[in-house]
Amino acid sequence: MKLRAPRRLHVLATALAAGLVGILLLTGSLLNATASPSTQQTKSEQARTADLHSAAKPTVVLVHGAFADSSGWNAVAGRLLDAGYPVLAFSNPLRGPLADGAYLRDFLATIEGPIVLVGHSYGGAVITNAATGNPNVKSLVYVTAYAPDEGESVAAANTLGGGHTEVTDHLVLRPFPGAAQGDADAYIDPAHYHRLFAQDLPQATTRIMAVTQRPGALAALVTPSGPPAWKTIPSWYLVANQDRIIPPEAERAMAARASSTVVQINSSHVAMMSHPDIVVKLIRDAARG
């Protein structure tokens, strides 16, 4: 009998230990089950908050001009995305303000909710035509851009305020299929690209921009613009005081005519590349306005 007692104690201890482990495992499962919905709820609430945060912001549509492409908006687009704005960069055909405006108008019709429409250079003439009559476009932003009046061409807008541009003296013309008589694709001569288009960027950058530039149809410079959206939609305008494509005098005149909120900086024509933070602030001001 004395030999069996320790064995019985051992069996009892083993059973008690197994039971204790089971209780601990069950308790842990219950705790996890209790905590899990709360954790899931927190994550769900965070996701909903993020969605609402994004939904509360208008879609920013960025429109490039001639002698460039949408990559010129990269620094601006990245900052806007980081700030929670939906962003779309429109690929501008560069055929003429009326045709390009109609194309952009159809593009904007696919976007739900409010829109901030931003144009650079010739892209300004395109947004001026595209936004007219679109109730979703809440504000226009002109970044060293054309804001022509009805019947006014880009070439005529350059003469406002008594300024002068050299760009027409340094164009390279190349034919394109289907071009009307006398029309052609116009490029800035790469030898003058840095000095005229982007003198405040590194030459290592502008030499690539010069050989990858997208041309604009020569006819786009002289085609009269349609009814301007800036007559009915609030606008913001960034004037580049060192612009050698659009005379700064013309930029100030167009901004004043449109009753735009104006910011002036010492920049080349490509302010969105050399001063992206200032451009982003202007766009965000327009979005809040």
Image: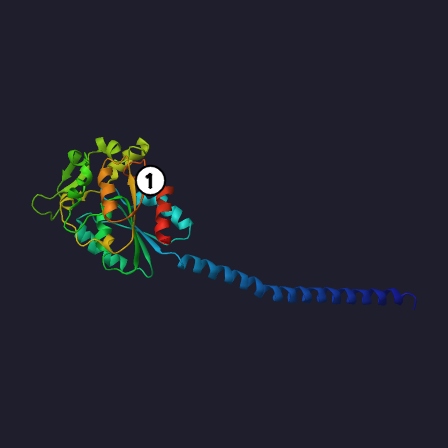
Q: Could you tell me if residue 114 is visible in this image?
A: yes
In the image, taking residue 28 as reference, residue 41 lies left or right, namely left
User: What x and y, as percent, mark residue 110?
Assistant: 28, 60
The three-letter amino acid code for the residue at tag 1 is Met
Q: Left or right? Give the position of 225 relative to 238.
A: left
Name the residue nearer the viewer: 71 or 132: 132
Which residue was labeled with disc 1?
273
Q: Could you classify mark 1 by the number of other residues whose Cα lies within 10 Å: few (under 14), some (14-19), or many (20 or more)?
A: many
> Where's residue 186, x and y in %?
17, 40
In-front residue for pair 232/43: 232
Above or below, 51 relative to 252: below
Q: The N terminus lies in which quarter of the figure? A: bottom right
Residue extending furthest toward the left = 181
The image quarter in which residue 240 lies = top left
Identify the secondary structure beneath mark 1: helix
> Who's the residue at 7% across and 45% down the image?
181
